[in-house]
Image (spheres, rainbow, N blue to C red):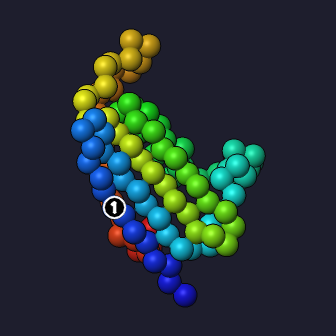
Amino acid sequence: MRALAALPLTLFDDQAVLDVTDDGHGFEPAALSDAPVEARRHGLPAMRARLRQLGGTLTVESAPGEGTALSAAVPLEAPRPDPSDTAGRSSVTASAVPYGAPR
């Protein structure tokens, strides 16, 4: 059985919002932070970190058997540099993998 997904991108005056929803198996988001380190994946924490670097947010809603909804919001104005970021990173790159493609 294949899951269906929708990916609308909405541009507002002050931000761009990408919503990703699917009708897959779903999961319990709170269980991610309670999982042992070796059982965790990098996907959601990495997405949240990249969005935070851009001054944005990631919202995750899901429940077992109910599918998943992610909402990534990024301000359209460039974020101000964080003086505590000693690494001096100012850009974020991302790559896309087609939905359902093997990784």
Seen in the image, is 26 located left or right of residue 56?
Answer: right
Give the residue drawn at x 45%, y 68%.
103
Taking the spot 35% from the left edge, 33% from the top edge, the residue there is 54
| Amino acid beneath label 1 | Pro
Residue 97, horizontal then vertical, whole percent: 36, 65
Secondary structure at badge 1 equals: loop
Which image quarter holds the N terminus?
bottom right
Left or right: residue 81 compared with residue 64: left
Find residue 15 and report its horizontal and vertical position in percent.
30, 39
In the picture, residue 85 is in which quadrant? top left
Q: Is residue 53 above or below residue 67?
A: above
Pick the residue in front: 78 or 17.
17
- Say if 59 sits above or below 62 in the image: above
Whole-percent x, y for residue 96 in the image: 33, 60
**In-front residue for pair 31/16:** 16
Which residue in the protein does label 1 denote? 8
Q: Name the one closer to the observer, 53 or 68.
A: 68
Q: Using residue 60 as the reference point, say whether residue 103 is left or right of it.
A: left
Question: Closest to the observer: 70 or 99?
Answer: 70
Can residue 86 be seen here? The reply is no
Question: Furthest residue to the front?
Answer: 13
At 24% from the left edge and 38% from the top edge, which residue is drawn?
A: 13
